[in-house]
Image: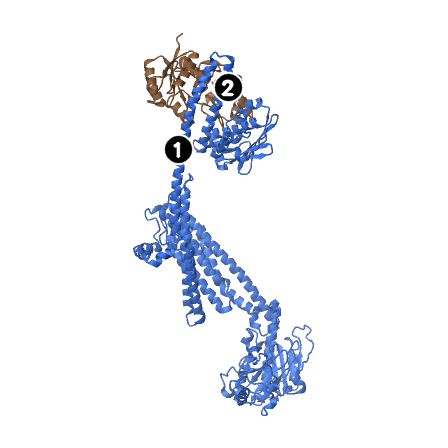
Amino acid sequence: MEKIQVLVTDDDRDIVKAIAKLLELEGYSVIKAYDGLEALEALAENPEIKLVIIDIMMPNLDGLSAIMKIREKRNIPVLVLSAKSEESDKVLGLSIGADDYITKPYSPSELAARVKSSIRRYTSLGSESAESKTDVITVGGLEYDINEKTLSVDGEPVRLTAKELKIIELFMKNPGRVFSAEQIYTNVWNEEAFAVENTVMVHIRHLREKIEINPKNPKYIKVVWGVGYKLEKNH
Amino acid sequence: MKKIIENIKRNKLRSSFALIAALSAAAAVAIQPLASNARYFYASADDEGAFSDYATEGDSDMTPKEKGQFRANICRNAVYSDLCTLGTIYLSNCSKGAYKGTPTLYEQMYQSLSNFDMKASDVFGIKNASSRGVNVDQSHYNITNIDSSYFYFYVEYDGEYLTNIEGVDEMSEKNRLANIMNMYDKSYYLRENNKIKTKPLHDESGLGKTEVYYTEADQDSSDKLTSEYIDSDKLMLGAANKDFIDRYTICFSPSGDNVLYSYPNDSSDYNSYLRLDDDTGELYYDEDSVMYEYGDLEDADGSYQTVTTSQITMYPGSAEYKKACSQEGGALNKFGVWTDLESFPNYYFESLDTSKLTVFMSPKTDIATTSAALITKYQKQYDILNVVWICLSILSIGSALTFAIITAARKAEKYKDDQITFFDRLFKPDFSALAIVAGVVLLCLSISYGFSYYGFQVSPLQTSLPALISFLSFMICLIAYDKNVKIIKTHVKGSGRPRLLLNVINDRTLPLRKRIEEKKANIGIVKSYRKLSIKTKYIIHSIITVAVASIIWHIAYFDISLPIYAFYVVLLLTFASFVGYTAKLIRDIMKLDRQLDEILDDSDNTMGKCEPILKESSKLYSLDKKLSEVSNRAELAVDKQVQSEKLKVELVTNVSHDLKTPLTSIISYIDLLSKTDLPDEAQDYVKVLSRKANKLRDIVSDVFSLAKAASGVEISMQRLDLAILVRQVIADNEDKVLQSEKELRIDIAPNHAPIMGDGAKLYRVIQNLLDNALKYSMDYTRIYITLSENDDRYLLSVKNVSSYEMKFSAGEITERFTRGDKSRSDGGSGLGLSIAKSFTEACGGEFSINIDGDVFAALVKFDKLTEQETANDQLTDDESDITQT
């Protein structure tokens, strides 16, 4: 089978080299670029590239501008890899078309997992199967089939317990909405809620372990501190 | 007219208040004369001054009845004294009912006769007799409504008599007196043959004790006249004498004053009195008036001089007097020289025969009771009227105020109409100033009016009405003024202030005042005055005011010819200038205060720039200038601060980026290295490298977030529930706790603890505290996490028992990079608590550390949301509904 091509762009050659090595170990073929312009050229030359990893602060053409240029032509997943770790930076990056935002210094295994997840989503469903069934709710890489009561992450089915299924169904039906632990409990358990934070949290933690790449830094189910929990809507 | 009626109908409530105010004010004014009338009667019975000659200490404690008796006694005594005098002087000169004496004496007697309605006006054709005669001086006793007509009297001298009892003429001379006494058996006073029988006035039996009093003169008929101290309830017998110049000296006066009347036989000016000294029982001579004090008789050596009748020698102006004056070398008392009678052989003193005198008196009514009843009546009347008056006043003030308030409130609604009503136009500040001035003037006038009458006794209306008027107008005008200003500010754009008389004058005179101001500013003395400190200026002004006022006071005090009102006006002007000065000062202070408010008004805790707003002539100009300088400098400082804060954040961002990039490489390559085939030893090294690299990553991340928190950027406040947050963090860390050898004891008292804060930041706070507790507490101990509340705050405390000795202060531990155990090197960047502190404070909370022995306690306090905010939030919570499963 032909290796999947990934474009890695960073002005720090050592980092590019390290990522390339990491991804090659994971079985990808890596094309390197050292600034935004080079990245665009590389993309133009290699239409087979399935994923772009790009830094933001780069000479000639910065990462954000590069992403916008890429988005004009291609629909491939773009991972931002930046030292800028502020919430605002992440929001900006994601809003102009990046699919994921990883801050430096990254954990190599997490990076590998995210790359894998993004590519699978892109190839198996994402852009290629634009039509989705009516009874299926999709939020990012999550797909929930209401009739069959099944959840798949990036196309891979996940085994969930009954309670976890009910929780994820509540979240999937109301993406972006914040639920307090009491609300989740009354909806899922159908019982009067009292000091249920722990119970709910335990289930959410288990859920995260099954659907998140890094449960410590969750992408989907997030805690809104002091208020409740929500399913991140925009991916 | 129709319009007015309609208006009244529409504003029923308001009109009724106005009506009540007007009516009650009118009623109060109407009853005022009644009240003061009653007060006059009441006070005249009450006023010691009126009875001063008789009053003894404790008179003020008398009941109305006692007062009535007291007055009845005075009246009775006066009438008795007069009757005795008439008997001895007039009747002794009568024969068979006709007066046979000299016209001069008759003239003297005229007034007394008039008092008893007995004058025979045709005798000698005397119509306007002089008042120098025998006279019961009623005004002196202040007896206004009880007089001789209250008595039946009968006075007889040697068969001649005067009486107001009808039918006496028909009686035979022999049993006349017996008949009269039969007629008035119940109570009477009788003098007969130098004896007095008194039937006590209030003896119900009508018998009473008969008491007889003698005078010394009566006993030995000598020319020496003495008296015993006489109870005011009894009558004194008294005696009458005639001296060598045919002058009568009569002593029938019964009570404490012991006035002896002397009657010159000619119309010379010796309208004098002999006075009886209470203590010694001796007579002395007094000139002109009974009002002279004993002190007037002071001798050259300061001792009191008294004389007996036998010592009376001469009168000022007489030959003897002149002779004596020359003898004694002028060191004489102005009233004469007191020498023995014997040294003046010409002098003789003839005792009149009072044994022929008979006086009968019987009260027509129970005058004591009448008088007492009268006083009680007036007192009651006064009390009631006073209460009514006060009630009316309060009602009037209250309704007027209510009227004013309702009116103002109604008018406030009309702001929309862009109109200034008649009411507003009427009560301009100018008018209010006039009203206040009028009120003050009225007050002053009424007080001085009160002065001239009864000393300080001024009726309540006199004082309070002007005060009421001025206060009311002040209130109304205040309300109207506020409205005037508001309306004009809101609707009359550009002008900015009301077109009031004062302002018009101000505007008109502005160029002139400016020119004057310019000229003034160039005068040397003005320049140097303005440079003085505020204190010095104030002192100078005060000294000038006091000096002017005291000069005026002195002029007025010593020079009576200066009209008193001129004095008032000047004094008022001086005072007003001082008040004006103070008012200006206060106005300027208020302006400065407003300016300060404006400066401090910015919500972002910075200061605004400001220019001086006071005029250069203001006393506080220098202060204002300094203030504006301060604000300008503060603004500069704030600018600098902001600049440096920005630089700091930028620096931190750059440094952090510069640190992160190589760190990324290090971590990446260590990871790659760990995946390559290495000898075991090398693998171990790589593990250490990996661990340290990860720790370095944590530290860099912590430093970065701390720097951000300290610079206060990136805080997004929202409403959140501290109770939920704490539970979330604990649930989130459940595995960590399970792995450790510690237990958590959680006590979250409030079910909900809504506060404002940044959830992500506060999560870090609690997370750090929990981490800290887990890391540094002793194994097998418990960590206490408590959320409690008091009236206005939520309190979160995390307590644990330290596993090592805490040799640091609470302050030190929150410093950056401080770790409790300095020797320790595992885990943590040493920034956990400082991040917790910074984040808490960035969210508006309060963070404190408490160390008590081995117990380490971290406290986080947050203000409660107000109920309003909480309610609002809950509303929005309930609005959206959940898609049910």
Horizontal relation, residue A39 to residue B874: left or right: left
Q: Is residue A31 above or below residue B864?
A: above
* Residue B131 on image: x %, y %: 51, 81
Task: Say whether marks 1 and 2 touch (CB < 8 Å).
Answer: no
* Sequence order check, earlier mark of 1 and 2: 1
Specify the quadrant of the image occupied by residue A140: top left
* Measured Cα–Cα span from mark 1 to mark 2: 36 Å
Q: What number is the disc on residue B688?
A: 2
In depth, the one of B30 and B814 nearer the eye is: B814
The amino acid pointed to by label 1 is Leu
**Tag 2 secondary structure:** helix
Say above or below: B255 vs A4: below
Any part of residue B229 in sight: yes
Query: What count of labels does the image hold?
Result: 2
- Image quadrant occupied by the C terminus of chain A: top left
Which chain appears blue? B
- B354 and B522: which one is in front? B522
**Given this view, does label 1 or label 2 mark the residue nearer the observer?**
2
